[in-house]
Image (tube, grey):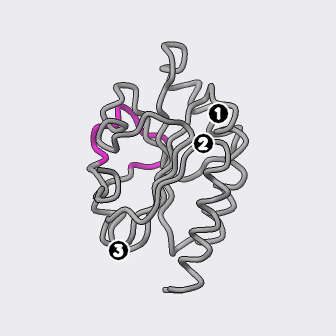
Amino acid sequence: MIKNLILPELDTATHWINQKAVRNDLLGKPSLIHFWSIGCHYCKQSMPLLNTIRDRYVGLLHVVAVHMPLSEEELNVAEVAEACTLYRISHPVLIDNTHRLADSFDNRYVPAYYLFDKEGRLLKARFGEFGALRMSRTIDYLFQRNPE
């Protein structure tokens, strides 16, 4: 199940914002993949912390956002792009309007956070309101133990 998850291919995204993220480009460094939705209150609250994680570990950690719409109203790519600007999301954003990417992660939650090692093996998954904070602590611990 989830404990043996290998970083799935990311090419099932329907759209990209900022830059394209390809699975093979993420290998070689740990990667944080976070699922969010513009209609999710907890997702919006977690964005400043995710940006801090991204900036703290620039060059050491890949951060990729996946927008997983929760309703028909959240399928508008322009609105997702506006939210990315509002929340200062400068890392790659995959838009998963068909939920194919969510299915490859077996994910049904927002917010959801998946941390993979440099070989693409799942290290930790966190979900919900405090998921970003818990993942932040996990990432800090990872880089304190393995600074490279």
Observer-side mark, 3 or 2, equals 2
Q: What amino acid type is highlighted by mark number 3?
A: Gly
Q: Nearer the viewer, residue 56 or 34?
A: 34
Mark 2 surroundings: few (<14), some (14-19) or many (≥20) residues within 10 A: some
**Residue at disc 2, secondary structure:** loop
* Nearer-N-terminus badge (3/2): 3
Q: What amino acid type is highlighted by mark number 2?
A: Gly
**Residue at disc 1, secondary structure:** helix
Q: Residue 38: x percent and y percent?
A: 61, 29
* Badge count: 3
Quadrant of the image occupied by residue 28:
bottom left
Report if residue 2 lies within the magenta region.
Answer: no
Which residue is drawn at the image coordinates 50% and 85% (left, top)? 146
Main structural element of the magenta stretch: helix, strand or loop?
A: loop
Vertical relation: 119 (above or below) 89: below
Report which residue position mark 3 lands on: 28
Dot 3 and dot 1 residues touching (CB under 8 Å):
no
Report which residue position mark 2 lands on: 128
Report if residue 14 lies within the magenta region.
Answer: yes
Vertical relation: 143 (above or below) 19: below
The magenta-colored residue range is: 10-20
Q: Residue 51: x percent and y percent?
A: 66, 56
Which residue is drawn at the image coordinates 68% and 37% (left, top)? 42
Report which residue position mark 1 lands on: 83
Furthest toward the top, the residue is: 72
Observer-side mark, 1 or 2, equals 2
